[in-house]
Amino acid sequence: MRTLVTMLLLCGAALSQELPDAPSSSSTNQIRTADKAFWLSTGVYGASVAGDAITTSLWVSRASTCPREGVAVGLHGTRASSPRAALTMAGEFVVASVASYEFKKHNLHLGKLKLWDLPFVARTYTHSHDTINNIAACR
């Protein structure tokens, strides 16, 4: 009998409370992580990596007049084979893209500098320079 009375009191107390509001499902409150700026930066970085990977695979590993790689010697060696150079640069692209996405998703920044663009900007110049250097010296 005590159990029945206790259960009725608890049910009555639970029914007297109001339910919380349902979460909003409007898309106006959500901020897109992968927006136009992210995809533009990813595309520019991807093009510079692809250019460097193609010119390195085609010319640097086969020509003796080409300068040795200076920046990433530990990654793909001084005379990288075509698959090794391409896979190394593809892996670097994936790591930089994931890091940039996570930085943007968590809104990391130092002062006014947003860190999500940093992995792309830091390496785009290097890969573009290496592409131009490979075209100029290794043809």
Image: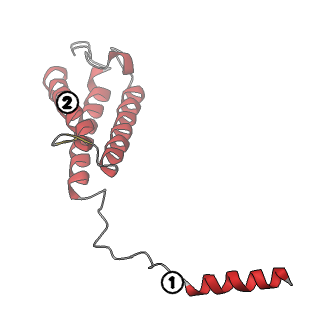
The answer for how far apart the CA atoms under marks 1 and 2 are is 65 Å
Frontmost residue, 101 versus 95: 101
Frontmost residue, 40 versus 48: 40
Question: Which quarter of the picture shows residue 118?
Answer: top left
Residue drawn where x is 41% and y is 32% of the image: 87
Q: Where is residue 101 shown, x and y percent of the image? A: 33, 48
Is 95 on the left or on the right of 137, as rendered?
right
Classify 10 Å Cα crowding around label 2: few (below 14), some (14-19), many (20 and above): many
Nearer to us of marks 1 and 2 is 1
Q: Quadrant of the N terminus?
A: bottom right
Frontmost residue, 55 versus 96: 96
Residue drawn where x is 25% and y is 30% of the image: 55
Frontmost residue, 39 versus 13: 13
Classify 10 Å Cα crowding around label 1: few (below 14), some (14-19), many (20 and above): few
Question: Which quarter of the picture shows residue 109?
Answer: top left
Vertical relation: 101 (above or below) 86 = below
Vertical relation: 132 (above or below) 63 = below
Identity of the residue furthest to the right in this view: 1
Q: Amino acid at mark 1?
A: Glu
Q: Where is residue 72 shown, x and y percent of the image? A: 31, 20
Which residue in the structure is indicated by mark 2? Answer: 131
Q: Amino acid at mark 2?
A: Thr
- SS at circle 2: helix
In the picture, the disc for residue 132 is none
Residue drawn where x is 23% and y is 32% of the image: 123
Is 93 on the left or on the right of 129, as rendered?
right
- SS at circle 1: loop
Question: Which quarter of the picture shows residue 84?
Answer: top left
Which residue in the structure is indicated by mark 1? Answer: 18
Of mark 1 and mark 2, the one earlier in the sequence is 1
Residue drawn where x is 20% and y is 54% of the image: 37
